[in-house]
Image (cartoon, rainbow, N blue to C red):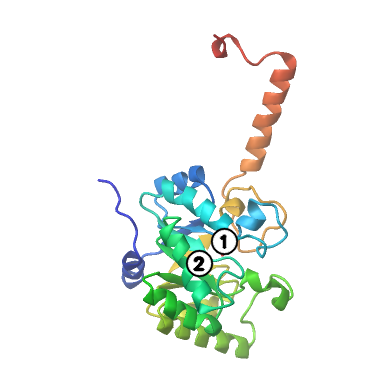
Amino acid sequence: MEKQKTTINDFLKKKQEGRKITMLTAYDYPFAQIMDEAGIDAILVGDSLAMVVQGLENTLPVTMDEMVYHTKMVSRAAKSAMVIGDMPYLSYQVSIEDAVRNAGRFIKEAGAQAVKIEGGRETAEKIEAMTKAEIPVMAHIGLTPQAVHRMGGYKIQGKTEEAAKRLMEDAKILQDAGAFSLLLEAIPAKLAEQITKKLSIPTIGIGAGVHCDGQVLVLHDVIGLFERFTPKFVKRYADLKKDALKAVKQYREEVEKGVFPGKEHSF
Ligand code: KIV
């Protein structure tokens, strides 16, 4: 039997039943197809696109149009995985109207089922407005890469008692604003566990320990296609760069030596 499309109700049900939610990023059709086939619950079209696909320094320059373009490719492949569009920098910070309109583009134009937005209590009004417009929102606190300049780099968050208290408060505010789940990035495992226990919505961790309701990683980190830096929380499951390099070198050598194309590849 074909697997049904994952919904926000499935997310909630998995938390209630103590079953882990699986999520990875993808930015194009072939990788989204692999994830769908592998049974991943949700695909995040992350603004990490800027760094791992576009080769940019950080996530700040990626645009709404670029995010919509990549989300469309992913949506075409995702038959069962939920597709979540990541709202890029300045697509929601300026006004509630911007937030709803841009979030709506992910749903209306790109075929996503939900969006993700970075930030704590300052995003609550926007989450409320998006939710009222029938757009499911995943909130994202802890290390929020769009705040890289304010944070002074990609640093673990919530280490002091005061910072942990603020994150705990933010989590509750975002749940009350209507977020259907909460992404926790680079915070101590103990704090992530406390937040997870306190909330009725599921938490998805990246660098937030094993007690979150689900986990997410950036695909290119997982399969060895991003080399610039590897955070401590990443586990590499494959080395596709090595395999692709080997294949391309072999192709070059065979063309240069006249070995390829062989008779079997010729008409
Ligand atoms: O853009 C992204 O890939 C993310 C991950 C850190 C989850 O937000």
In percent of width and height, residue 253 lies at 73, 22
In the rendered view, tell whether residue 88 sits above or below residue 33: below
Find out whether the residues at labels 1 and 2 contact each other: C-beta distance under 8 Å: yes
> Residue 99: percent from the left, percent from the top?
51, 73
Residue at (41%, 84%) from the top-left corner? 176
| Amino acid bearing label 2 | Asn
* Residue extending farthest left: 1
In the image: residue 1, left or right of residue 226:
left
Residue at (61%, 63%) from the top-left corner?
Answer: 233
Quadrant location of the N terminus in the rendered image: top left
Residue 215: where, in percent of width, then height? Answer: 49, 64
Q: Is residue 241 above or below residue 169?
A: above
Relative to the observer, which residue lies in front, 57 or 87? 87
Of residues 57 and 38, the one drawn nearer to the viewer in this rendering: 57
Instruction: Identify the residue under disc 2.
Output: 102
Return the x and y of residue 207 as percentages of the image width and height: 58, 68
Instruction: Write down the residue under mark 1.
Output: 64
